[in-house]
Image (tube, rainbow, N blue to C red):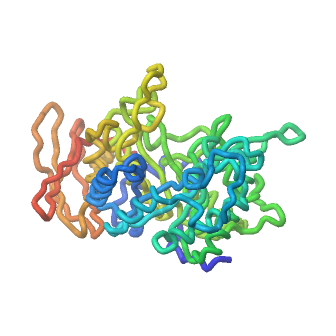
């Protein structure tokens, strides 16, 4: 077993029953930040379009922007095929697959160097697509990747990045066919089997062994990075979790499997346009409003000795889709509100080790396709595709939640750029008025978080203002209250 770093975790968290999940989540939001928030929760930011760009000026500008938010952690996905020699060819290249010199790391090296210069740290997610020559049949870049070859690649990655990266995650959304195939196969009896979970288990074991051979045995290695909801082609995350750990429906592990030596479980807790409190009808799906489904599974896996006990949950990719996506997108105001509520849910859960923002800018709309396909990427950015800031931009710097209760409204927020305790001003706008008036001032904790309670007023809207040490005044977006109970 690796000499695993100890992860602080609350051992008193008892997940609720399925019928109580939503109520508990709503009640959690009303608890003051100082009473429930994780003091060690990281904020991750992912912006591949800018940070992995060949445009050094754009990369530097974006890193400065992220650093200016107060964010110190970046999530970066390292695609095996993207750095491997002859990635599109079936023939195995005549190179030492364990040697870092066999790969082209240049895109990532530029980012790592620039991030380090700004005191930022990386979570490196190593994932498919893979070189064709590293698959069983060498027919594509996703089907039956070789776990042994992946272990060699992880050894090379560990040797190359070992001095600058000590947090790794193995595979991006392995329960999704865009990254790993086959997802499902039929047994002789005709039953469907989540084959991707069995493949992933071997990838994880060999990948971790590769890091150990590279001398990275004390690094943090995450299991999962699961997509939130299953379909006919995507394996449900809880189903995948069980199969990857060799657990049956009664949470009993098959003989000979043993414990996976993970340091945490990573998940992508995206919700739908229905908002953060959406409850997926399948109990095997996990969105932001029902995190207890996954933490409960983690606890049961720990008791079955399939994973170490007391692991924390890393929400490594998250965002709220906005307009102009006509199908999944909400308004810009709702995007900022839903993201703030989601972060409050995450920060109020002591099992959550990290929460994230996916994209600085929306994906470019596709040209020359029907309107229904134009926005088939992600519109979860803080800026529109052309670069214009959306309301979520200021909402990310100054997230605000207004939880409307029976006779009061609890306000919760973060001054994300703050480097220590600071003062925030809360403003109100009454129904039918265009005038903003000061409601209160509050003092944040050392991490910029604050919470206060005011009398409930129907139709009232809120925003926050903060003056930075250099005199710059930042104003958050208009925020509506919601019924938290």
Residue at far front of view: 94
Residue at the extreme right? 188
Residue in the image at 48% along x and 62% along y: 123
Q: Which quarter shows the C terminus?
A: top left
Residue situated furthest top in the rendering: 370
Front-lying residue, 53 or 457: 53
Residue 338 is situated, as x and y percent measured from the top left of the image, at 37, 43
Q: Quarter-wise, where is residue 232 in the image?
A: top right
Outermost residue, bottom side: 3
Residue 326 placement, left or right of 207: left
Q: Is residue 451 visible?
A: no
Q: At x 83% / y 66%, what residue is drawn?
A: 256
Please determine whether, in this image, residue 168 is positioned above or below residue 381: below
Q: Position of residue 390 (x, y in %)?
A: 28, 40
Q: Position of residue 291 (x, y in %)?
A: 53, 53
The residue that appears at 56% across and 61% down in the rendered structure is 169
Say which of 386 and 469 sits in front.
386
Q: Position of residue 283 (x, y in %)?
A: 63, 44
């Amino acid at each position: 077993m690796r000499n695993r770093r100890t992860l602080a975790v609350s051992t008193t968290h008892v997940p609720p029953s399925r019928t109580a999940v939503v109520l508990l989540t709503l009640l959690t939001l009303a608890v003051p930040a100082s009473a429930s928030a994780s003091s060690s929760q990281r904020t991750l930011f992912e912006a591949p379009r800018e940070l992995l760009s060949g445009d050094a000026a754009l990369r530097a500008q974006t890193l400065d922007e992220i650093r200016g938010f107060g964010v110190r952690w970046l999530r970066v996905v390292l695609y095996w095929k993207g750095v491997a020699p002859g990635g599109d060819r079936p023939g195995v290249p005549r190179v030492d697959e364990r040697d870092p010199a066999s790969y082209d790391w240049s895109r990532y090296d530029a980012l790592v160097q620039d991030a380090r210069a700004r005191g930022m740290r990386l979570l490196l997610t190593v994932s498919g697509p893979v070189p064709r020559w590293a698959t069983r049949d060498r027919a594509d870049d996703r089907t039956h990747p070789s776990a042994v070859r992946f272990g060699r690649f992880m050894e090379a990655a560990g040797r190359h990045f070992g001095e600058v990266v000590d947090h790794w995650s193995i595979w991006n959304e392995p329960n999704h066919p865009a990254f790993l195939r086959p997802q499902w196969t039929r047994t002789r009896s005709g039953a469907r089997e989540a084959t991707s979970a069995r493949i992933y288990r071997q990838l994880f074991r060999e990948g971790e062994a590769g890091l150990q051979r590279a001398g990275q045995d004390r690094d943090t290695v995450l299991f999962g990075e699961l997509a939130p909801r299953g379909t006919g082609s995507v394996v449900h995350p809880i189903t995948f979790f069980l199969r990857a750990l060799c657990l049956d429906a009664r949470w009993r592990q098959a003989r000979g499997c043993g414990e996976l030596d993970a340091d945490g479980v990573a998940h992508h807790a995206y919700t739908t346009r229905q908002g953060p409190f959406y409850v997926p009808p399948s109990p095997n799906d996990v969105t932001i409003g029902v995190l207890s489904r996954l933490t409960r599974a983690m606890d049961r896996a720990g008791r079955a000795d399939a994973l170490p006990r007391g692991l924390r949950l890393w929400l490594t990719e998250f965002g709220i889709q906005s307009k102009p996506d006509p199908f999944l997108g909400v308004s810009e105001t709702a995007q900022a509100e839903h993201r703030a509520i989601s972060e409050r849910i995450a920060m109020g859960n002591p099992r959550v080790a990290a929460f994230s923002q996916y994209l600085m800018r929306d994906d470019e709309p596709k040209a020359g396709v029907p309107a229904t396909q134009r926005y088939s990427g992600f519109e979860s950015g803080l800026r529109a595709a052309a670069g214009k800031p959306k309301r979520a931009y200021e909402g990310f710097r100054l997230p605000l939640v207004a939880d409307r209760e029976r006779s009061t409204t609890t306000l919760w927020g973060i001054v994300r750029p703050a480097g220590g305790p600071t003062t925030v001003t809360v403003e109100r706008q009454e129904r039918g008025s265009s005038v903003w008036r000061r409601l209160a001032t509050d003092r944040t904790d050392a991490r910029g978080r604050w919470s206060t309670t005011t009398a409930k007023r129907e139709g009232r809207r809120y925003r926050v203002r903060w003056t930075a040490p250099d005199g710059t005044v930042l104003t958050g977006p208009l925020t509506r209250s919601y019924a938290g109970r």
